[in-house]
Image (tube, rainbow, N blue to C red):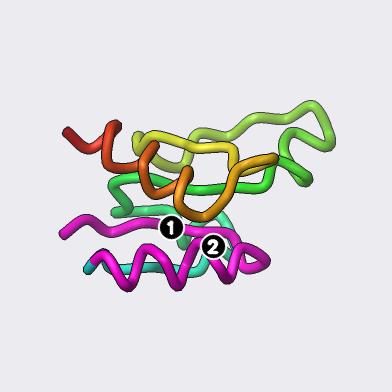
Amino acid sequence: MAKIGVEQSLTQVQAALRERGHEVVTLRQENDAQGCDCCVITGQDENVMGIQNIVSEASVIHASGMSADQVCQQIERKLK
């Protein structure tokens, strides 16, 4: 299955992805996103200083306002 990077605070999303057989990596720093097929973020810390560094070519999903199941569905659509 896919390697998915998920922000540390999204524990329900991490659990749901593991249940579906995905490898889950906790995103604590930029380097954690390397090698991931997709990344899930809350968007709270996004572009705080107006600086954007690309550290991965993976798709990024903003989980704000979404349930864990909705996030999983988004990921599965992006990975097809």
Per the model, the C-alpha gap separating discs 2 and 1 is 6 Å
Residue at 15% from the left image edge and 60% from the top image edge: 1
Res 74 quadrant in image? top left
Q: Give how far across and how far down residue 40 sits, in percent.
A: 51, 48
Res 10 quadrant in image? bottom right
Q: Give how far across and how far down residue 69 sits, in percent.
A: 45, 52
Query: Eyeballing the image, is 10 above or below 75?
Result: below
Q: Give how far across and how far down residue 56 sits, in percent.
A: 40, 41
Which range is magenta?
Answer: 1-20
Residue at 22% from the left image edge and 38% from the top image edge: 79
Q: Which mark is residue 14?
A: none
Q: Give how far across and how far down residue 36 sits, in percent.
A: 32, 52
Query: Eyeballing the image, is 67 above or below 78?
Result: below
Q: Is residue 11 magenta?
A: yes
Tell me the crowding category of disc 1: few under 14, some 14 to 19, or many 20 or more residues within 10 angstroms, Cα based.
many
Quarter of the rendering occupied by the C terminus: top left
Residue at 22% from the left image edge and 68% from the top image edge: 21
Q: Secondary structure at mark 2?
A: strand
Viewer-nearest residue: 76 or 54: 76
Res 24 quadrant in image? bottom left
- Amino acid type at image mark 1: Gly
Q: Is residue 23 magenta?
A: no
Hey, which residue is sitting farthest right in the picture?
49
- Amino acid type at image mark 2: Leu
Q: Which residue is mark 1?
A: 5
Q: Secondary structure at mark 1?
A: strand
| Precedes in sequence: disc 2 or disc 1 | 1
Tell me the crowding category of disc 2: few under 14, some 14 to 19, or many 20 or more residues within 10 angstroms, Cα based.
many
Q: Which residue is mark 2?
A: 27
Residue at 67% from the left image edge and 47% from the top image edge: 42
